[in-house]
Amino acid sequence: MSAIMFCFRRRKSAKPKAKAEAPSSVPPSKNGLNSAEGDISTNFSSNGGRRFHNVENSQYLLPNDDTESDRLHSQHWIVRNVQGGNFVAPVEKELDQGIKVLDVGTGPGTWVLEMARDFISSTFIGIDISANWPQNIRPPNSYFQIANLNEELPFEKHSFDYIHLRFLGMGLTEKQYEDGYKKLLYILKPGGYIEIGECDVRFAFQNSIWNKFLETMVQSRGMSTTMAETLKDTIQDIGGCEVQETIFRYPLGPWGGKLGVLAAEDLQQVYGIFKDNMIQALRMKSPEEFDAAVVAEFKEFNRLHTSIIYHKIIVHKHDSSGHNRSKSKTTAKDSIVKLRETLSMLEKRQAHLETKAENEYKIAKLNATKNRRVALLALKKKKAYEGQIDKINGTRMTIETQVMAIENANVNLETMNALRGGAEAMRNIHGSIIAKWRFSKKTKVEKGSERSIPGDINKVDATMDEIRDQMDIANEISDAISRPVLGDELDEDELLNELEELEQEELDAKMLESAPPAMRAPNVPSHEPAMNTAVEDDEEAELKKLQASMAM
């Protein structure tokens, strides 16, 4: 099933009035990084108590206020957990070493702030069409700047090693998106990566009120509902890079567990933002009719097990020679080293998560009878950590299996190379012997008789016979030495039977020494049995166990 939860996550990005180059260490203090340049009253407008962008060439329709920032933080958490982290591109090693990173459509800056915290050696810059990011409290290697992807970007050619963007599809026309991508490719260094995330914006069932509203809105703004599906082909047609696409599916509704519930809550907020527009576009008679239609729509999402299709596209720019450096041959040794480094990192991560899970359990146990809310929250965190630990265990097993497979393949390769070398050596030796033998046949002495030389084939046979005789003598000597000096060899089966008898005697002795446990009579119930109730969830059950243990 296709859907649209995250299509509004990111905003188009923008440019300041005074062009400013991204800093290497200390940002400019005015009209540059970290500045919310311009009169804020002209950057925003109000409608229905919500704050919106007020940028002339912006197609973005969602609000830009604290309520929207909270929703975007939640969406970021969902994306991060579904795709297994904040990024998919193979840039972790480079991030650890220190590179320059750009986040396009940064919104409240959640991605930049988390990445800057995790990779302190790299520099992270977030851009957007208006300032909605933290102005003071942030990591020292993170910067923000107003910039617009529809205009000239304030960065020089080859400024960045890695560029990240997602959910710009519903804020740009297809032409604007293509032109914006070319600008990003221009400021990306050769060999660098662009990571793009976009989702399908239509649901699979035809009666969706969102689909009907979307058709009206998209047509009036010149945008496309299939941009995410065709984006990979569009980028490949532009050229100059290698393109890979991975598709993730996000559950929508209670059928998908907690993640599906959070996704549904997020989408319901989007419906609420567009409520007046949808009532007008769909010609509904009242807000109550709209509310009933939304309830029915989300029930249908859950019944059909609807998912959101999320396209993750990784672009690897060719180096200056026009080739992709990632195509260089990787040796078995290099692969094993990298895999073992990854294993080490996962082991550290697992130990960290196990410590956090243990701490949350202690918190839950401490508050089991004092503060149920705190205890339940701690148990939820504990289960989340345990889920991550299970995933890490699976990943470690996969990597360890791959390491063993590479090592075995490498051993097989070395063995085959050795065998080929041995065969070649034997061919050379035999060729030399045969050549000498043939030469000796043609050699004549003065009286016309043949000269006998060591290369004669008869000498080879005689030598081999002598070797066989010596081997037979050696075998006889070995047999004589290996015979027991105390007579006949001992029967191994007899020894094993005796050992089993000893083990059984020791086991019987231990069983006789241990007294049988005292039997406790069951407690007689003091009240009538309660009516059957619904089974409580895992978190409530675990909390009750904690409370019982605290009461004893």
Image (cartoon, rainbow, N blue to C red):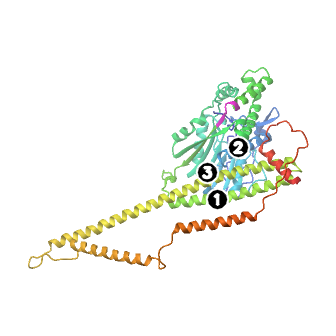
- Where is mark 3, residue-wise? 162
CA gap between label 1 and label 2 equals: 23 Å
Please tell me whether mark 1 sits on a helix, a strand or a loop.
helix
Measured Cα–Cα span from mark 1 to mark 3: 22 Å
Residue 315 in the image: state x and y as whole percent: 56, 46
The CA span between labels 3 and 2 is 22 Å
Q: Amino acid at mark 2?
A: Ile
Please give the label number shown on residue 345: 1
Q: Residue furthest right?
A: 526
Query: Quadrant of the rendered structure where residue 261 is?
Result: top right
Residue 298 percent location from the top left of the image: 73, 30
From the image, which quarter does the C terminus lie in? bottom right
Image position of 366 (left or right of 345): right
Going from N to C along the chain, the mark reached first, 3 or 2, is 2
Going by the numbered disc 1, the residue's amino acid type is: Met
Q: In the rendered structure, which disc, 1 or 2, sits on the residue that comes first in sequence? A: 2
Magenta segment, which residues?
302-308
Residue 520 is covered by the magenta coloring: no
In the depicted structure, whether residue 538 falls above or below residue 45:
below
Q: Can residue 334 be seen in this snapshot?
A: yes
